[in-house]
Image (cartoon, grey):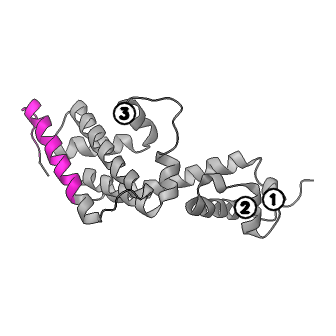
């Protein structure tokens, strides 16, 4: 008969998630988990097969939390701008989780058009918000999304690494200016497309 679990799955995962938010995923070790739970590492393995399983679930929890930020952004009157600000807010408020999800070393360099749908679980919904809000064809919306994500990711990375600091108001102004410029260029190339310019 297997030994009775001293801690629940939820208790262990919540502790692992807390460690990740404070110190990063590298700090999620059996020893650190045991220490935080006031125990040895052994009870962890009555619930989980190994530490890789724990870390994978922590990544899922991180994605779920990020998803809440995206949902808030999509509820904005200007959803695409809202998502951009939400992405940067996530970086500001959860820097270790942002690094985990969006600043990990990639195995192979890829074109942004390939990588963005892979790393962004909400890609289709965000893209749809661009198409619907600005009456754009899919290709034009994809190009706009790629450009804005590049810019937004740059700001988020600068904030996480402490290279620069911006207020939310400054971020909103910058995103609006860049977006208007890109939208103007796209509409100039495709005069048939009509829509809002803010």
Is 4 rendered above or below residue 57?
below
First of labels 1, 3 by sequence position: 1
Q: Quadrant of residue 8?
A: bottom right
> In the image, residue 13 lies at what x, y percent?
66, 59
Q: Is residue 3 magenta?
A: no
User: In the rendered structure, which segment of residues is drawn in magenta?
Assistant: 173-196
| Left or right of 35, for residue 18 | left
Marks 2 and 3, the one that precedes in the sequence: 2
Q: Is mark 2 on a helix, strand or loop?
A: helix
Disc sitting over residue 41 in the figure:
1
Farthest bottom residue in view? 38
Find the distance from the CA under tag 2 to the CA under tag 3. Answer: 37 Å
Secondary structure mostly seen in the magenta stretch:
helix
Label 3 belongs to which residue?
112
Task: Tell me: residue 180, above or below residue 185.
Answer: below
The answer to whether the residue labelled 2 contacts the one labelled 1, judged by CB atoms less than 8 Å apart, is yes
Query: Would you call the spot at circle 2 few (<14 residues within 10 Å), some (14-19), or many (20 or more)?
Result: many
Q: What element carries label 3?
A: helix
Is residue 51 visible from the viewing direction of this image?
A: yes
Give the image location of residue 60, x and y in percent. 56, 50
Q: How far apart are marks 2 and 1 (CA)?
A: 7 Å
**Mark 2 sits on what residue?**
33
Q: Which residue is located at x 21 percent, y 43 percent?
A: 132
Which residue is at a point 73% across and 61% down the rendered structure image? 32
Q: In this view, does 166 lie to the left or right of 60?
A: left
Q: Report the Cα–Cα distance between label 1 and label 3.
A: 41 Å
Count residues near mark 3 (Cα–Cα under 10 Å), then give few for <14, some for 14-19, many for 20+. some
The disc, 2 or 1, on the residue closer to the chain's N-terminal end is 2
């Amino acid at each position: 008969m297997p030994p009775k679990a001293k801690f629940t799955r939820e208790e262990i995962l919540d502790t692992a998630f807390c460690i990740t938010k404070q110190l990063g995923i590298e700090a999620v070790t059996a020893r650190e988990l045991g220490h935080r739970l006031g125990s040895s590492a052994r009870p962890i393995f009555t619930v989980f097969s190994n530490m890789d399983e724990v870390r994978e679930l922590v990544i899922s929890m991180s994605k779920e939390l990020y998803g809440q930020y995206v949902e808030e952004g999509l509820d904005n009157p200007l959803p695409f701008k809202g998502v951009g600000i939400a992405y940067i807010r996530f970086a500001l408020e959860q820097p270790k989780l942002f690094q985990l999800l969006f600043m990990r070393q990639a195995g192979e360099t890829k074109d942004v058009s390939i990588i963005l749908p892979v790393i962004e679980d909400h890609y289709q919904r965000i893209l749809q918000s661009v198409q619907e809000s600005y009456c754009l064809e899919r290709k034009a919306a994809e190009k706009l999304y790629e450009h804005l994500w590049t810019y937004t990711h740059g700001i988020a990375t600068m904030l996480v690494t402490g290279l620069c600091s911006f207020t939310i108001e400054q971020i909103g102004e910058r995103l609006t200016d860049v977006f208007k410029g890109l939208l103007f260029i796209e509409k100039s190339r495709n005069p048939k497309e009509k829509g809002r310019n803010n």
